[in-house]
Image (cartoon, rainbow, N blue to C red):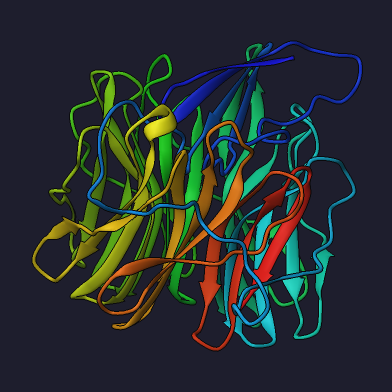
């Protein structure tokens, strides 16, 4: 039996051990935007990221009379066959597309306490599982992936380590060298938990990974690591005042070595606020982010230094709505988005042209099960796009590609889910 108690940014889940394999959170009707991070401590598991529900706010929106439509013939998006790993409870969390014949998707499979990394590759014809390291005998999860070239890609997440009888997350970085995925040496962040939620790569000598590290009793601060071409290094970044569960960076994007953005959230009393940080080539700085009540950001994508998007969710419970913010070169503003009955979350965004961007996530109708959600920017407004559904509860948490070759990934009940446009 799994009992959940809402806690934005890191949701604590009490798990009653059972003789059989435990079903992961989200393997039944899923909470909107669960992108999965699990931390096993005795009988407790911590679920983090990607748009877990907030507490109490409204969102600038255009009301709609109906929920997101299902995809039909000619809508552009379709489900493609995607394999599962060797274990149960499979989920894909992020995708990176290098070309029409090369893409990577990462996530996890397995049961709590025995989660294994899961990596799949598109070769131009089909998706196939590729062997990936799981260094820990306990939990190993991948959240982010970035392609550098056909012989270089990065994946980030966490594995687990036990120190003096206590089990912690440990930031995990893996690298593809053209033939094999291997664990890359990475610096130890603090003495407790550390997770890397997102990664972006500018070149073979310049990549960035972001996440959080635990500095107290379930209180986090932002974590950033930088690949210099020879080693991953910890980078000092500013943090908002830390209260409650603290602050986390969940997504990162870059247009150049002097224009890198990271987004997430931080606790303020019983609410959360969007966290946005920027690197100008010399230092990281906190950037003001608008918020309507309680809100947080999951991922970010930039088309140019003066054109970027970030997505997440705002509000709480059955009133949660997807949140989209836009950077115009001077400031961040909240974009008008469709309001959908029930609760919604936007987990990832992809900026392609000034007149084309995509956001993906999930929504849960009143008294219903989780469904995939896709929204499209046409240069003027964000609108709902028909989204194909599995009969079981489904969600989307990652998107990547080009206008001609788009991928969105997530899960459907205990199976991987991949959409193509």
Tell which of 207 and 84 is nearer to you: 84
Q: Residue 159 lies in what quarter of the image?
A: top right
Q: In x, y percent, where is residue 417?
A: 72, 58
* Residue at the farthest left position: 330
Q: Residue at x 69, y 51 (%)?
A: 411
- Direction from residue 74 to residue 133 in the image, left or right: right
Viewer-nearest residue: 322 or 367: 367
Q: How many circles with numbers are drawn on the protein?
A: 0
Question: In this rendering, is residue 65 above or below 75?
Answer: above
Q: In the image, 363: left or right of 252?
A: right
Query: In the picture, residue 301 is in which quadrant?
Result: bottom left
Whole-percent x, y for residue 37 in the image = 58, 37
Question: Which residue shows up at 42% across the image and 28% down it?
Answer: 317
Above or below for 74 versus 328: below
The answer to whether any part of residue 187 appears in the image is: no
Q: Is residue 387 left or right of residue 179?
A: left
User: Where does the N terminus fall, quadrant-wise?
Assistant: top right
Q: Is residue 292 visible?
A: yes
- Give the vertical position of 346 relative to 125 (above or below): above
* Residue 331 on image: x %, y %: 11, 61
Residue 187 in the image: above or below residue 202: above
User: Which one is in front, 355 or 73?
Assistant: 73
Report x, y in % for residue 214: 42, 26
Residue at the front extreme?
A: 65
Identified at 32% across, 71% down, the residue is 302
């Amino acid at each position: 039996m799994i009992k959940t108690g809402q806690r934005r940014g890191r949701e604590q889940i009490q798990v009653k051990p059972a003789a059989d394999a435990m079903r992961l959170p989200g393997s039944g009707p899923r909470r909107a935007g669960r992108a999965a991070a699990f931390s096993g401590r005795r009988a407790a598991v911590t679920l983090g990221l990607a748009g877990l529900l907030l507490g109490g706010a409204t969102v600038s929106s255009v009301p709609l009379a109906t929920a997101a439509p299902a995809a039909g013939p000619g809508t552009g998006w379709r489900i493609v066959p995607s394999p599962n790993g060797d274990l149960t409870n499979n989920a894909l969390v992020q995708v990176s597309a290098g070309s029409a014949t090369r893409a990577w998707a990462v996530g996890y499979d397995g049961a709590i306490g025995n989660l294994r990394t899961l990596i799949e590759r598109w070769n131009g014809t089909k998706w196939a599982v590729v062997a990936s390291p799981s260094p820990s005998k306990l939990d190993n999860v991948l959240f982010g992936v970035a392609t550098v070239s056909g012989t270089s890609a990065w994946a980030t997440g966490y594995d687990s380590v036990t120190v003096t009888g206590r089990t912690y997350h440990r930031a995990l970085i893996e690298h593809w060298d053209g033939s094999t995925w291997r664990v890359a040496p990475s610096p130890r962040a603090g003495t407790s938990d550390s997770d890397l939620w997102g990664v972006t790569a500018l070149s073979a000598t310049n990549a960035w990974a972001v996440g959080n590290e635990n500095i107290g009793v379930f209180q986090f601060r932002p974590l950033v690591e930088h690949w210099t071409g020879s080693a991953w290094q910890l980078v000092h970044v500013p943090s908002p005042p830390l209260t409650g569960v603290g602050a986390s960076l969940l997504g990162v994007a870059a247009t150049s070595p002097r224009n890198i953005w990271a987004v997430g959230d931080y606790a303020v009393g019983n609410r959360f606020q969007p966290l946005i940080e920027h690197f100008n080539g010399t230092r990281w700085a906190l950037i003001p982010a608008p918020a309507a009540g309680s809100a947080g950001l999951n991922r970010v994508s930039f088309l140019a230094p003066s054109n970027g998007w970030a997505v997440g969710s705002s509000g709480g419970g059955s009133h949660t709505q997807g949140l989209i913010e836009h950077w115009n070169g001077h400031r961040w503003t909240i974009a008008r988005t469709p309001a959908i009955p029930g609760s919604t979350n936007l987990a990832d965004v992809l900026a392609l042209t000034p007149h084309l961007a995509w956001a993906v996530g999930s929504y849960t109708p009143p008294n219903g099960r989780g469904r995939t959600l896709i929204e499209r920017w046409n240069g003027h407004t964000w609108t709902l796009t028909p989204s194909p559904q599995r009969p079981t509860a489904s969600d989307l948490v990652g998107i990547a590609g080009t206008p001609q070759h788009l991928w969105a990934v997530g899960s459907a009940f205990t199976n991987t889910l991949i959409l193509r446009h």
